[in-house]
Amino acid sequence: GAGVSQTPSNKVTEKGKYVELRCDPISGHTALYWYRQSLGQGPEFLIYFQGTGAADDSGLPNDRFFAVRPEGSVSTLKIQRTERGDSAVYLCASSLIGGTSEQFFGPGTRLTVL
Amino acid sequence: GQSLEQPSEVTAVEGAIVQINCTYQTSGFYGLSWYQQHDGGAPTFLSYNALDGLEETGRFSSFLSRSDSYGYLLLQELQMKDSASYFCAVSLTGYSTLTFGKGTMLLVSP
């Protein structure tokens, strides 16, 4: 079956611009996670959705970052007024239910802020 | 804060056995996971330990000692395709948001 997909695969933007990153989880997976990964580092947790609601958004670095999952499937991570420090690979993962450590990751979106 | 320590790099030859250690200091703990990530690829789940002891899955085994805040991933019969980064990750809560270490790059040579 299809895995987690993310679009776009690459995004280059200018400082101060707004970007949206999309994640399509595995069909039927109720839990969805966003992470970001900088070069040479492990993934860093951003936000966790259980169904449509954000169950834990403690990893969002500031109020420029926001994510939605309106129908409990596709999720969009939104970044306002991008900064050069936001450059990273943004990873999405899903799992059948919350509370399992077996998360299925997508290939990521590489965001570059010039 | 949360802290996970693992070696930055390990080298080995094909057919050998290698152990990648992970020590952690975290405010909560539900379990320890291991993920593999090839260069430019997505992390893929390898194993999970919630209780002390050894879990074996084919050529890979993972161990946990909760009292020592320590775990390791053991890879046997190494193959060239095992060259990748390996991350330990702690589940701090029951819903398994993961806190990852910085990763160990494993280089397998012929």
Image (cartoon, rainbow, N blue to C red):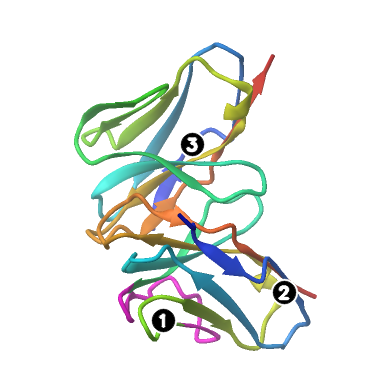
SS at mark 3 in the image = loop
Residue A38, magenta (yes or no): no
Q: Position of residue A99 (x, y in %)?
A: 25, 58
Quarter residue A32 falls in: bottom left
Q: Earlier in the sequence, mark 1 or mark 2?
A: 1
How far is disc 3 from disc 2 in space, using C-alphas?
Answer: 28 Å
Residue picked out by circle 3: B6
Write the residue at 23% across / 50% down. B30
> Range of the magenta residues?
A50-67
Quarter residue B108 falls in: top right
Assess disc 1: are there few (<14), some (14-19) or many (≥20) residues with their C-alpha within 10 Å of its C-alpha: some
Q: Are marks 3 and 2 on the same chain?
A: no
Residue picked out by circle 1: A69
Three-letter residue code for mark 2: Arg
Residue A66, magenta (yes or no): yes
Q: Position of residue B81 (x, y in %)?
A: 61, 28
